Image (cartoon, helix red, strand yellow):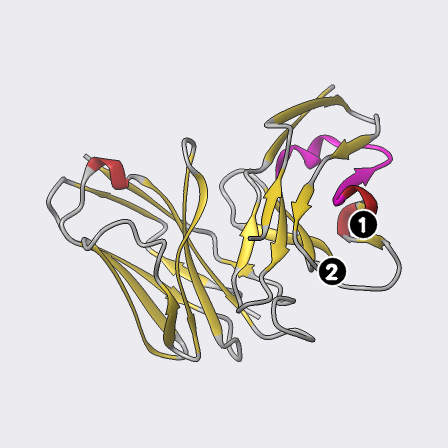
Amino acid sequence: AQSVTQPDIHITVSEGASLELRCNYSYGATPYLFWYVQSPGQGLQLLLKYFSGDTLVQGIKGFEAEFKRSQSSFNLRKPSVHWSDAAEYFCAVGHTGGFKTIFGAGTRLFVKA
Amino acid sequence: DAGVIQSPRHEVTEMGQEVTLRCKPISGHNSLFWYRQTMMRGLELLIYFNNNVPIDDSGMPEDRFSAKMPNASFSTLKIQPSEPRDSAVYFCASSSPGVGVGTDTQYFGPGTRLTVL
């Protein structure tokens, strides 16, 4: 069965520092992978997605993610974090048996001044 | 584009009362999802519809929960009777098929925060 693991429940980084959020998936074929962000009091919003092709994917708000098949990972990165990036981040895998998406447990990002 | 619309945004009710949450998906989207989010259990998929037909309701916790989608532009999630443990934020999301099955992006509404006293 497909699954998504986000090993870090929460992460704290200083404003201006680089960020990497980890995501590991379990799936037998090429997965469809997503990163969503949830700002406080709001619904989830798509940051980026990977289906095929170039393994480095650019998203909104300066985020990027890299698909590494050998490590079953799809880590999210940002070179310089802004205070407004404080939010919860969800990795997700597309379900090829239908329209359902499997979400990870989320990683809450705290940004300190 | 108005996005996914949910109402009410906040609901406070007493145990035993019926609660109805409403969702209007993005026009043209043919899949609709209901999620529940709590601190303890995270984001849980309750049910999803495709072309107004329920496809998978295995996430619906109990018979007290029911969902309908009478047409392409409206869905409801009902809890009857409500209990304190139903307190959560309930999200509705919609999507249209991407380039292949499993590729669709979901667009989430702002959520309904339900408190059952």
Q: Residues within 10 Å of mark 1 (few under 14, many from 20)?
A: few
Q: Quadrant of the N terminus of chain B?
A: bottom right
In the image, taking residue A70 as reference, residue A94 lies left or right, namely left
Name the one closer to the observer, B15 or B60. Answer: B60
In the image, taking residue A68 as reference, residue B35 lies left or right, namely left
**Residues at discs 2 and 1 both on one chain:** yes
In the image, taking residue B103 as reference, residue B64 lies left or right, namely left
Q: Residue at x 18, y 53 (%)?
A: B64
Is residue A68 visible to us here? no
Q: Position of residue B53 (x, y in %)?
A: 37, 77
Name the one closer to the observer, B86 or B63. Answer: B63
Q: Residue at x 78, y 25 (%)?
A: A15
CB under 8 Å between callouts 2 and 1? yes
Q: Residue at x 69, y 75 (%)?
A: B99
Query: Under tag 2, what secondary structure?
Result: loop
Is residue B59 within the magenta segment? Answer: no
Q: Position of residue B50 (x, y in %)?
A: 45, 75
Magenta region, residue range: A72-89
The amino acid type, in three-letter code, at marker 2 is Thr
Name the chain letter of the residue that bears numbered label 1.
A
Q: Residue at x 64, y 28 (%)?
A: A8
Q: Position of residue A40 (x, y in %)?
A: 54, 38
Is residue A75 within the magenta segment? Answer: yes
Q: CA distance from mark 2 to mark 1?
A: 8 Å
Residue corresponding to mark 2: A30
Q: Position of residue A5 (x, y in %)?
A: 62, 39
Residue corresponding to mark 1: A69
Q: Quadrant of the C terminus of chain B?
A: top left
Query: Under tag 1, what secondary structure?
Result: helix
Is residue A72 visible to us here? yes
Disc 2 or 1, which lies upstream in sequence? Answer: 2
Q: Residues within 10 Å of mark 2 (few under 14, many from 20)?
A: few
